[in-house]
Image (cartoon, coloured by chain):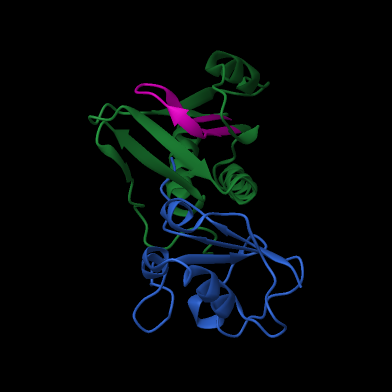
Amino acid sequence: MTVKVRFFARFRELLGTDIPAEPEDGATLLSLVRDLALKKKEGYDAIFDGHGNFHEFVIVMRNGKRVEHDDVGAVKVADGDEIAVFPPVAGG
Amino acid sequence: MIRVQTEDVDIGALVKAAKEPGTGAVVVFDGIVRDDGITEMELEAYADVAVAEMEKIAKEATAQFRLRHVDIIHRIGRLTVSENILIIVVSASHRPEAYAGSRYIIDEIKKSVPIWKKELTRDGGRWVAGEHGHGAGKH
């Protein structure tokens, strides 16, 4: 299974973006992003709290649709998914 | 026209195109880079999702305020002070709808469109904090 993880803004600066990943079957959005972010402590701390959950302000999307924090530990990633993780928007 | 792009736009041409038969008012919002002691501003977008979200906002505004025409162009990349960031052109039969529709569109963009700004200074840079803690597709 191959998926792509896209970080934006400050998260991109800390962790890179358009990262191809090959998670194991059964991986969830939470486990996928957590495993990638663990590679750099500053990036991990920007996205996750001390309990390993997304900070309240972090936005997670799967294939362009937002996934609520209550569901990220249950939603399994599928082949070809594009997962996006970013801070609050600030356009306009 | 709903776009995220690096290039600037010809606002005069957009206004001309917005003057469809039956139009009584055209309102232009032009958000520009403010001189806040910065050297440049860098803008980044999740482009596909940003365009889809702006199309949704334009559709909602058109229905709610009976707009006749909507253009939204959000620029990305590096911009200098006084350059255009966001251009919104709306037309309607009457002034109140045009003003209200334009205001609705900019307010919704700030809530939900995945675009970020970084102010670049001589000492480095700082990401502009979003005005809304959530945003981005939360409806």
Is A8 rendered above or below residue B67?
A: below
In the image, is residue B112 above or below residue B26? Answer: below
Magenta run includes residue B138: no
Q: Which residue sits at x=77%, y=71%?
A: A79
Task: Find residue B131 and report its horizontal and vertical position in percent.
Answer: 34, 52
- Would you identify the image quadrant in which residue A76 lies? bottom right
Q: Residue at x 59, y 50 (%)?
A: B53
Q: Is residue B128 left or right of residue A47?
A: left
Closest to the observer, B91 or B34: B34
**Quadrant location of the N terminus of chain B?**
top right
State left or right for residue A29 relative to residue B119.
Answer: right
Reply yes or no: does residue B82 show up in magenta.
yes
Q: Which chain is green?
A: B
**In the foreground, A72 or B10:** A72
**Chain A color in figure:** blue
**Residue segment shown in magenta:** B71-91
In the rendered image, which quarter is residue B55 located in?
top right
Quarter of the image where the C terminus of chain B is located = bottom right
Q: Between residues B108 and B39, which one lies in front from this camera angle?
A: B39
Residue B40 x/y as whole percent: 36, 28
